[in-house]
Image (spheres, grey):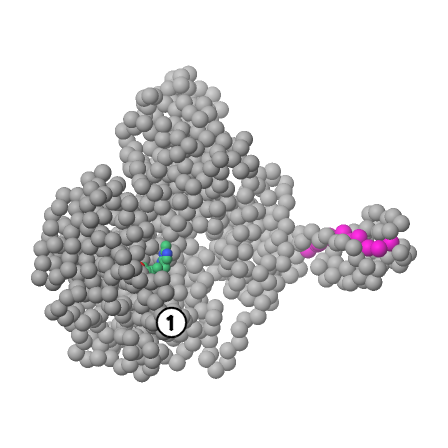
């Protein structure tokens, strides 16, 4: 091709709309930019129960830099399936993207984001110094916990509940000196008739209508 | 050698009592399934899928499968020099034919040598099946000789991979891998084949290739969303179509052209979308992105409604996401829901098969947008910012000129392969692409060394068409050994090494962004590539002068077999236009001076 007859304007002088997008590719008002803040979401994924699925899903979250708080996996009533409960903290677009990336993996049968009112539980086992057993027991009672093991030097207790309760209990035990603790991460199930993640759901992204209703219920 | 009798369907007992099928007597003679070992089941699985070519390199753990291929008529194995070459050749075969290419390798180093090619296919959604040998299952996990966790290594770079741990289903695994590579959003799959499984006795014929029940790619988009998108498109004042590689992969070029022409909407293509819309069409607004045309990038930046089809909004296309089509409402058609709003928010997400959704849209359009002024503006940009290089009468040769001369000399359906670097960009910019599946290169991964093996795979996929590969001297040095394959298989193709005695793209960036400090980018002792070619049994030619360039091109084309032209090009030539990495698309530089001002 030959040199243009009408050389166009230099880079800085070319027509360009005033609009802007934010870092997530969303069109925004250039005057009032506010990055969307992260929210916490509980995702439940039904997956085929086969070797490598956990590695596949955890690898997916790490390589796509999704911020995950906990990931638990366990069997379901159907031997061929396992359920993963994943708690992530991301802006809304990141949560949606995580769901879609999950759904896209072949061993993933269905994914659902649970509503805030879902039944959520976590279990912690805490081993504290046994110098003041009575006080330890009092705290364990307060949090509806159980003493699993008590010896001359240590007391081991179990607390089950929602995340906040577990956090509070751990704080309360700190005064005795926590030697070790182990948390299971989240287990969650949808409340009432609402499905958690079912086999019958096709392995594809929720339709926009579904997304819209989910967003409405979230608010 | 076992002779296989073709058997139409599987032998599996459906438990429903005596079958009324005329072939019921087969049930009494299971040995006639034609399959005696896991390896033969693998081969039968490949046959079921209609595979023609296998590209590979043999070795210990995959030997049973190779043995099962011995004297096999339907499947042709192309022995490559290096497994990376096998993967790229299979990848290019997949791009050109539209059906998965198949590569194979042994365990350990064979498998890891495939990795680059698999990752490349993954980035570009190319249909590819990789078969890898593995140590026997009893040894897995013990660091056995040539053991690599191939499943673990390739998990992040495959659409799906399968550890075949049962000889009874290993043949079916091949079909599953093939079907998954082929259907929905295409991509690479892998089957890891432990040696004890392929050696084990089985008479199980594989089932027909099919995807797992849980795999259900969407086809049609939601009607409400289609209506809304159609209305927005009709109301547009500055509408633009952005055609990505998905248009070609989804066989939707005709539907796209119909939508564009019916509603008179200019079309820009991405690099993988090159060929999705004829560049000779008056509505073609060229190629977009970092080294796209200025007029395409102006159109992208200024459109008010963008119909984006089968594109993942890669950063080499968008530049700075904040300035990408900042006024545009985006209608995004993609078969992969995860691409919707991944990088750029879709105002109208249309998840489905590109062709089907374009038809839906076509039917829903209540009229055409009034966009004459916009089309006029697009034409003005074409005049203001044409692709351009200085073409002096004196040597050294300008690479753009070589590309243009080749384009003129060859038929429209010629397949163009390219390596990665400046030469790739010149080939992309200065060739006029009018047909899908004619542009074969490494987009997302940017893999130097892609061109030579890709030319081989492309030629086998389209034996009646011309294949021209543009390569850089650096890229050529990475896979030049595959010339031995082209010579042995007597493949009629032409490779043009645009030789600037440097890894030129890096040298260009050093000039632009690193104060001209040429660290590790120049090759003062570049070999003579024509002689290298001759040593491999190909024809070697040199191009140094304008006056015999035409002749050299003809000589290479007429030579019946692989020909390599070592073309001495101007080592100072750079690729323009250029949007610096993360820059604003509308602020492309047309030359070094403009680049400096950015
Ligand atoms: C396998 C690989 N290694 C390194 C790079 C980084 N890289 C990108 S372009 C380029 C230069 C390519 O040189 P050459 O093939 O000679 O082509 P030219 O740019 O000179 O046309 C390099 C080193 C790459 N893309 N791929």
Q: Is residue B385 above or below residue B136?
A: below
Q: Position of residue B282 (x, y in %)?
A: 19, 67
Q: Position of residue B99 (x, y in %)?
A: 32, 44
Count neighbours of disc 1 (C-alpha within 10 A) and say few if under 14, some if 14 to 19, many if 20 or more: few
Q: Is residue B264 above or below residue B67?
A: below
- Whether residue B565 appears in magenta in the rendering, the answer is no
| In the image: residue B356, left or right of residue B491 | right
Identify which residue is drawn at 33% across, 21% down.
B1
Q: Is residue B70 visible?
A: yes
Quarter in which the C terminus of chain B is drawn = bottom left
Identify which residue is drawn at 25% across, 42% down.
B484
From the viewer's side, name the closer residue of A114 and B83: B83
Figure quadrant of residue B337: bottom left
Q: Is residue B31 above or below residue B154?
A: above
* Magenta segment boundaries in residue numbering: A119-130
From the viewer's side, name the closer residue of B72 and B503: B503
Identify which residue is drawn at 84% across, 47% down.
A149
Query: Which residue is under mark 1?
Result: B514
Q: Position of residue B563 (x, y in %)?
A: 18, 48
Figure quadrant of residue B272: bottom left
């Amino acid at each position: 091709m030959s040199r243009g007859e009408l050389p166009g304007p230099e880079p800085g002088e070319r027509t360009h709309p005033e609009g802007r997008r934010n870092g997530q590719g969303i069109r925004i008002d250039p005057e009032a930019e506010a990055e969307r803040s992260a929210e916490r979401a509980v995702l439940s994924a039904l997956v085929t129960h086969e070797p490598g699925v956990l590695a596949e899903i955890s690898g997916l979250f790490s390589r796509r830099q999704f911020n995950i708080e906990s990931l638990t996996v366990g069997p379901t009533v159907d031997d061929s399936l396992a359920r993963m409960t994943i708690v992530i903290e991301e802006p809304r677009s990141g949560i949606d993207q995580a769901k879609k990336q999950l759904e896209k993996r072949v061993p993933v049968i269905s994914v659902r984001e649970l509503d805030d009112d879902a039944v959520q539980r976590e279990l912690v086992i805490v081993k504290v110094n046994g110098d003041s057993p009575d006080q330890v027991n009092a705290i364990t009672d307060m949090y509806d916990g159980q003493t699993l093991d008590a010896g001359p030097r240590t007391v081991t207790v179990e607390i089950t509940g929602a995340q906040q309760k577990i956090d509070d209990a751990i704080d309360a035990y700190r005064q005795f000196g926590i030697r070790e603790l182990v948390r299971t991460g989240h287990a969650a199930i949808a409340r009432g008739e609402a499905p958690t993640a079912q086999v019958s759901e096709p392995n594809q992204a929720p339709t926009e209508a579904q997304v819209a209703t989910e967003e409405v219920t979230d608010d | 050698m076992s002779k296989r009798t073709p058997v139409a369907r599987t032998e599996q007992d459906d438990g429903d009592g005596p079958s009324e099928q005329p072939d019921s007597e087969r049930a009494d003679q299971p040995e006639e399934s034609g399959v005696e070992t896991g390896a033969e089941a693998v081969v039968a699985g490949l046959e079921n899928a209609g595979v023609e070519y296998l590209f590979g390199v043999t070795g210990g753990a995959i030997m049973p499968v190779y043995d099962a291929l011995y004297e096999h008529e339907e499947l042709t194995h192309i022995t490559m020099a290096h497994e990376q070459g096998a993967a790229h050749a299979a990848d290019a075969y997949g791009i050109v034919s539209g059906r998965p290419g198949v590569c194979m390798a042994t365990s350990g180093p064979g498998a890891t040598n495939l990795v680059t090619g698999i990752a490349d296919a993954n980035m570009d959604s190319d249909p590819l099946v990789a078969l890898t040998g593995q140590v026997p299952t009893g040894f897995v996990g013990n660091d056995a000789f040539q053991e690599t966790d191939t499943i673990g290594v390739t998990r992040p770079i495959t659409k799906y991979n399968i550890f075949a741990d049962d000889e009874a289903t290993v043949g079916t695994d091949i079909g599953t891998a093939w079907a998954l590579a082929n259907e929905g959003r295409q991509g690479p799959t892998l089957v890891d084949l432990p040696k004890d499984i392929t050696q084990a006795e089985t008479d199980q014929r594989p089932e027909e290739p099919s995807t797992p029940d849980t795999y259900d790619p969407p086809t049609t988009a939601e009607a409400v969303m289609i209506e809304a998108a159609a209305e927005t498109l009709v109301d547009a004042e500055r509408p633009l179509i952005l055609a990505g590689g998905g248009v070609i992969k989804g066989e939707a070029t005709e539907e796209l052209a119909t939508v564009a022409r019916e509603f008179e909407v200019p079309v820009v293509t991405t690099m993988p979308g090159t060929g999705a819309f004829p560049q000779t069409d008056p509505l073609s607004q060229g190629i977009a992105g970092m080294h796209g045309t200025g007029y395409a990038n102006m159109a992208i930046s200024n459109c008010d409604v963008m119909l984006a089809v089968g594109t993942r909004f890669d950063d080499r296309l968008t530049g700075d996401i904040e300035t990408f089509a900042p006024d545009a409402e985006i209608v995004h058609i993609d078969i992969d829901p995860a691409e919707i709003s991944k990088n750029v928010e879709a105002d109208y997400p249309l998840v489905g098969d590109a062709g089907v959704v374009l038809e839906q849209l076509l039917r829903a359009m209540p009229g055409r947008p009034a966009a004459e002024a916009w089309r006029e503006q697009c034409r003005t940009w074409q005049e203001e910012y044409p692709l351009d290089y200085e073409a002096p009468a004196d040597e050294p040769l300008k690479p753009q000129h070589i590309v243009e001369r080749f384009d003129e000399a060859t038929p429209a359906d010629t397949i163009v392969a390219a390596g990665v670097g400046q030469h790739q960009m010149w080939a992309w910019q200065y060739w006029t692409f009018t047909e899908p599946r004619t542009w074969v290169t490494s987009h997302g991964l940017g893999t130097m060394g892609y061109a030579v093996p890709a030319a081989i795979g492309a030629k086998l996929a389209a034996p009646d068409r011309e294949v021209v590969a543009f390569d850089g001297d650096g890229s050529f040095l990475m896979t030049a050994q595959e010339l031995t394959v082209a010579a042995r298989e007597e493949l009629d193709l032409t490779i043009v090494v645009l030789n600037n005695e440097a890894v030129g793209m890096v040298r260009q960036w050093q000039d632009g962004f690193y104060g001209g400090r040429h660290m590790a980018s120049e090759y003062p002792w570049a070999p003579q590539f024509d002689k290298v070619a001759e040593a491999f049994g190909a024809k070697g030619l040199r191009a140094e002068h304008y006056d015999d360039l035409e002749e050299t091109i003809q000589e290479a084309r007429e030579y019946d077999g692989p020909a390599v032209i070592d073309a001495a090009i101007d080592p100072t030539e750079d690729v323009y236009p250029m949007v610096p990495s993360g820059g604003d698309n509308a602020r492309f530089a047309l030359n070094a001076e403009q680049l400096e001002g950015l």
